Amino acid sequence: MVRKIKFDGKHWVGKKYYNDPMILRDYETVFQQARYNLGTGGMIAIPNARPDDMRYEEFFDRVKEKTILAKGSAFHYEPLDIYVLKAQEITLQDFWRQSLTYLFYNLPPHVNISGNSNSELLETAQGLNAISGLVGPSCINGILEEIINESSEKKVYFLNNIISQLDFFIGYSGSAALKLTNRKSISFYRDLIGERGFTYFKNDEDIHTIGITAVSGGHRTPHKARYLGFKPTIGTSNITIPEPRTDYFMDDLRRSLRNAREEDCILRPIIGETLWHIASMGVADKVRKILNN
């Protein structure tokens, strides 16, 4: 019988400012907190923030006891039975002068993607066999909200050229709770995606659904989180999926994300840590400006 596991598809794990090393007390704390919220077999995805960012690779190199999966695009930390995936988040601002934020899985280590347009980015992702998603809460106050109210012609173009190329849609992010965008993001999914069938540019025979997922979107894994009044955020929002098979890890993950439904999701807001992160990054920016002058 296939084991069911919980997957948090986006957590930044530690503070990182551009090309500086990631601020992380120790990797064991990350796995302990993931195990606390996700249980045995839990899975997290650590995103690289830019084409030149190697956050996942830095974490990968720190972990000594691991079983490498999918040629290094994921690994299993056996002492606590936790999976870690590489992800990449990227935002483009060329679609009708609005921005779209994507999240990709199944990218090789030390390989990040970029593109000057949405079509170029998505074609590059398909060329790498990436698992492609859209971060709904990050886009809903822009182009996605406009699409809901647009003419049918513009809406069809967006569905056929952007949405159809995806495997999953992030409907909920715990760290977006303060922005009040999660409810609108989920409504967008229900109204325009749901259980409809879509096809890729280069393979019109591959009719697939696009699943809805939930992520924590958290930023930190502080060693003394409970003593500071914060609960560990990693894994607080997640989705339940069948455990991927070792030899077909990314194929199984893609299939599970395409088939994911709202009832598979756990939704929990992150308030305290989000405020803490915003404040600390603001202070860091000011300090850097002073030091660079």
Image (spheres, helix red, strand yellow):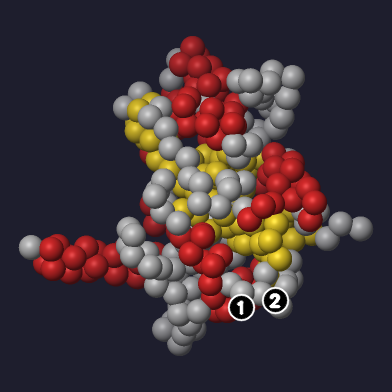
What's under tag 1, amino acid-wise? Answer: Gln
Name the residue located 41 percent from the left edge and 84 percent from the top edge: 228
Tell me which residue sits at (48%, 25%) in the image.
Answer: 119
Compared with 162, 53 (above or below) is below
Instruction: Using the image, tell me which numbered label, if any, was put on residue 161.
Output: none
Position of the N terminus, as image quadrant, is bottom right
* Mark 2 and mark 1: Cα distance apart in space: 7 Å
- Where is residue 140? Give x, y as percent: 43, 38
Residue 144 shows in the view: yes
Query: Which SS class for mark 1?
Result: helix
| Circle 2 crowding by C-alpha within 10 Å: few under 14, some 14–19, many from 20 | some
Q: Is residue 14 left or right of residue 133?
A: left
Q: Which residue is mark 2?
A: 80
Vertical comparison of 199 with 65: above or below: above
Residues tagged 2 and 1 counted as in contact (Cβ below 8 A): yes
Residue 117 falls left or right of residue 246: left
- Identified at 60% across, 26% down, the residue is 164
x and y, in percent, of residue 67 in the image: 71, 66
Q: Is residue 108 left or right of residue 153?
A: right
Give the amino acid at mark 2: Leu
Q: In x, y percent, where is residue 222?
A: 45, 78
Q: Which residue is mark 1?
A: 32
Q: Residues within 10 Å of mark 1 (few under 14, many from 20)?
A: some
For the residue labelled by badge 2, is the local secondary structure a helix, a strand or a loop? loop
